[in-house]
Amino acid sequence: GEDVEQSLFLSVREGDSSVINCTYTDSSSTYLYWYKQEPGAGLQLLTYIFSNMDMKQDQRLTVLLNKKDKHLSLRIADTQTGDSAIYFCAERQGNQGGKLIFGQGTELSVKP
Amino acid sequence: DGGITQSPKYLFRKEGQNVTLSCEQNLNHDAMYWYRQDPGQGLRLIYYSQIVNDFQKGDIAEGYSVSREKKESFPLTVTSAQKNPTAFYLCASSMRYNTEAFFGQGTRLTVV
């Protein structure tokens, strides 16, 4: 199968950490990505991780990859109201000619 | 400025008419993609192209057609055969394989 699954909603308070989770099914995936979408706009790449890595940190963002469980997470430290958006997980499938498959998106709501 | 441009931002179509959405990139990317976004369903792949004069169907190609006559351009035609065309359409491009995709700002199509 080609499914990428995410929970649909997450609500946090300003200053807390947010953790957005994603599961995927294709074990041949090479790269996994996190994108952010603000209302009415296109998708903005936040970060990505290669499939032979366990963790990647980029300022307030930490990506964790558990390849055995096919589980990816995005942690946002010190979440701000400007982080409110929809976050998409995506996988680049290695045996599908580089096809890029997205999850349903997680809507993050940050309350002051 | 380098980037990927979709036009128009908003498009209205009468039932039974074909309509073409434009996508142009000046990033010298080989691969281009069209996605459809509906609320709560994330992004679904319509068509993708890895190289000029070649393209493949995605998961929901029925009722859509594309062409890739130039590297910079990947127009999408929504035909009258598409039963539920009202949606937000996103175009993306990337280097050939295993790199991140960059997105345009989207076209919102409404059938009236």
Image: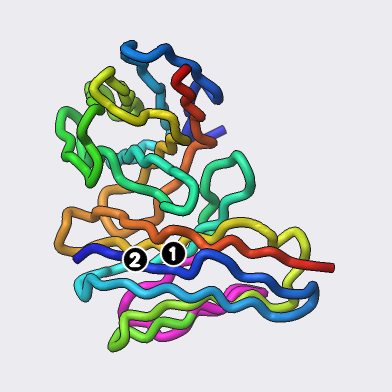
Residues in magenta, as a range: A47-63
Marks 1 and 2: CB-CB under 8 Å?
yes
Which of disc 2 and disc 1 is earlier in sequence?
Answer: 2
Using the image, tell me which numbered label, if any, was put on residue B101: none
**Residue A31 or residue A112, whichever sits in front:** A112
Query: For the residue marked with disc 1, what is the amino acid?
Result: Cys
SS type, badge 2: strand
Please state the horizontal and vertical placement of residue B50, each as a whole percent of the image: 22, 42
Kindly identify which residue carries mark 2: A4
Residue B110 magenta-drawn?
A: no
Using the image, tell me which numbered label, if any, was put on residue A89: 1
Please state the horizontal and vertical placement of residue A13, each as a whole percent of the image: 77, 74
Please state the horizontal and vertical placement of residue A86, each as a whole percent of the image: 57, 57
* Residue B31 in sight here: yes
Dots 1 and 2 on the same chain: yes
Residue at mark 1 to residue at mark 2: CA–CA distance: 8 Å
